[in-house]
Amino acid sequence: MKSEPSPSTYCKAVSKATRKGPGKRRSRRKESYAIYIYKVLKQVHPDTGVSSKAMSIMNSFVNDIFERIASEASRLAHYNKRSTITSREIQTAVRLPSCLGHINTTTIYKHRGNTFGR
């Protein structure tokens, strides 16, 4: 038969566990693509800034695209009875359907006058 700890030992253990130290509790860090989005923005447009609301929208956009690509790659791996998502599944997942790719390029050429990038 086990003996129970004395009440004084129990009180000490509880007081140590529930005691809060001085200062604020550190909050958990939130992961974000904000620093990477900002770095790319500065590479492309060095004199342009971005608001926190716009950065939040861009972060949501990147998360959404990442999730869509991952789910499509997962679906492709499942169709082919594979248990690993490789670069091939990712490449296939990001590929546009041929009809959409053709419409996209003809629209660009029409609006830009066959000079891409000028």
Image: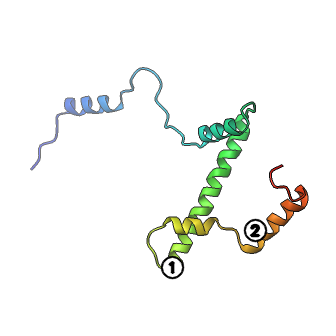
| SS state under label 1 | loop
The front one of 11 and 78 is 78
In percent of width and height, residue 15 lies at 31, 29
Q: CA distance from mark 1 to mark 2?
A: 25 Å
User: Mark 2 is on which residue type?
Assistant: Gly
User: Which of the 4 quarters of the picture holds residue 110?
Assistant: bottom right
The disc at residue 93 is: none
Query: Of discs 1 and 2, which sits in the foreground?
Result: 2
In percent of width and height, residue 52 lies at 70, 35
User: Would you say 52 lies left or right of 25 here?
Assistant: right
Q: Name the residue at 36% across, 27% down.
A: 19
Q: Name the residue at 51% across, 76% down.
A: 78
Residue 22 vertical placement versus 113 (above, below): above
The disc at residue 101 is: 2
Q: Name the residue at 68% across, 51% down.
A: 61
Residue lying farthest left?
A: 1
User: Would you say 104 lies left or right of 33 here?
Assistant: right
* Pointer 2 local density, CA inside 10 Å: few below 14, some 14–19, many at least 20: few
Residue carrying label 1: 80
